Image (cartoon, rainbow, N blue to C red):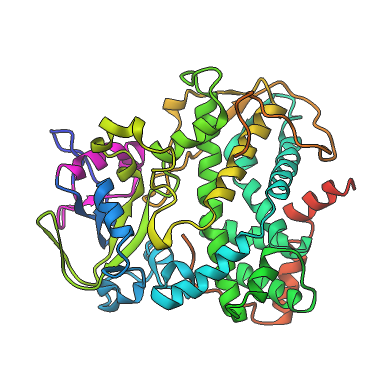
Amino acid sequence: MQQHSDRTGAPAGCPAHGNIQLYGPEFGSDPERHYAHLRSLGPSAPVDIAPDVQVELVTSYDASLHILQNPALFVRDSRRWNALNEGRVPADSPALPMMGYRPNALFSDGAAHARLRQAVTDSLATLDEARLVRLTQQSADYLISRFSAEPLGQAELISAYAQPLPLLVFSDLFGCPPEIGDRVIVGISGIFEGTPGADEILGGALAELIALKRHQPGEDLTTRLMVHSARLSDEEVLHQLVTLLSGGTAPLTAAIGTSSALYLSDDWPAGLPVEEALVKTLWNYAPIANYAAHYPTQDVELNGRTLRANDPVVISFAAANTDPKLTAHREQLSAKAHLAFGAGPHSCPAKDPAFMLVATAVESLLNRLPDIELRVPFKDLAWAPTPWSRSLVTIPIRFTPRTVPSAPAAQPTAPRSAQSAPAAPPQAYAAPRSAQHAAQHAAQHKGGLFSRFRAWVRGE
């Protein structure tokens, strides 16, 4: 149901119980006003994260850090969720794909979490930084080559660049052959877009990839997970891959888009490096805005409010990062003190590669299109009306049309500024119901984005 502001300027709550609604056009247009009102109620307050789904939202930086770093009292296993177990969460709720249990590191605790996370972190540690930069630059060059020759010199940066770039990089890092990579991209994109059958496409593609790597191991993340000493089952490998995909694509899209738009805005100081725009994005426009549901193992008092055992407590990374109590000493804080990557045992295991990928993507855009400009002022750009992410809907740009090289550059491109150098997941997935079904998907997506990209890299 649509909410409307009251005469005091505070957002109105749901008529049924008064909770602030953390979704819809009004929230999307001005989330900071909602967070400011919620802060006036204390370090946490009840909100509707989706229709008929109530959670306790933590807006305080200190309280968020306390919960994130206290895994004994606040656990992540959503099978504890009272309302879900009691049938009070709608079966079609958009909160379920984001909060429902999956057998991965993100929703595990204790020894189970340690085992799965170690496999992920060890596999990520094998990533070669030079290769990641090269893959990101190649992906950027290819995507720019697709839109920069438009005769009007105009494009929409999110759909043409920020969305597909991480998917191209991930498909390569996972060791996908072109036909499987195409289906991975179609599947994960469809999940975020709500496309029917997208989960089956993704699950089938990853299951096929895992089967392939059993017979043809390679120097890729999929193989690293499969041969890790934790001895993950094929199903566990699949779920860790899904977590990496879904936890990386939407946030990285948001970070690339917002950082690019910030750098191109009229208010951005000349000479500041791209990394500064990315750090500002992580502090002020946290790509994962409200997430990381925790479940108290017992009733907990938080500044006079009782957090009931097994009721979800959601961390507002966006509100915590902009907590006014940080203002006095924000300059003294480390640039990495933000909570955009989480904190504690469940913090993002890929924060360094993620930062490098985004910085390289923005640098590549600026280097290839040196006269790129926003067609709309930054302050007038629209934000997605969702509680989960802080992402721009569109970023209209203009530039002088140009011919981009048809093959990737042999050497990394020097950064545009002298000081600058690259420094929630869906439910379980079933494989296709039959070989015929899998073949139909393969035929449907033959010659897709990843296939065309790999052919372009080969110079075909």
Is residue 215 depicted above or below 139 in this figure?
below
Q: Is 145 part of what is drawn in magenta?
A: no
Residue that appears at 43% across and 77% down: 111
Is residue 445 depicted above or below 407 in this figure?
below
Q: Is 34 part of what is drawn in magenta?
A: yes
Question: Where is residue 308 drawn, in percent x and y?
Answer: 18, 68
Question: Where is residue 433 drawn, in percent x and y?
Answer: 64, 81
Magenta-colored span: 13-40
Quadrant location of residue 94?
A: bottom left
Quadrant location of residue 286?
A: top left
**Does residue 195 appear in this view?**
no
Quadrant location of residue 414?
A: top right
Is residue 104 depicted above or below 126 in this figure?
below
Q: How many marks?
A: 0
Question: Where is residue 401 drawn, in percent x and y?
Answer: 74, 24
Question: Where is residue 280 drawn, in percent x and y?
Answer: 44, 34
Residue that appears at 71% across and 74% down: 208
Side of 104 relative to 368 (left or right): left
Query: Looking at this view, is 403 or 269 the one in front?
Result: 269
Side of 238 relative to 377 (left or right): right
Residue that appears at 62% across and 38% down: 422
**Does residue 223 appear in this view?**
yes
Side of 154 relative to 302 (left or right): right
Residue that appears at 19% across and 41% down: 37
Query: Looking at this view, is 73 or 29 the one in front?
Result: 73
Seen as rendered, the residue at the extreme right is 460
Query: Looking at this view, is 242 or 336 the one in front?
Result: 336
Side of 386 relative to 135 (left or right): left
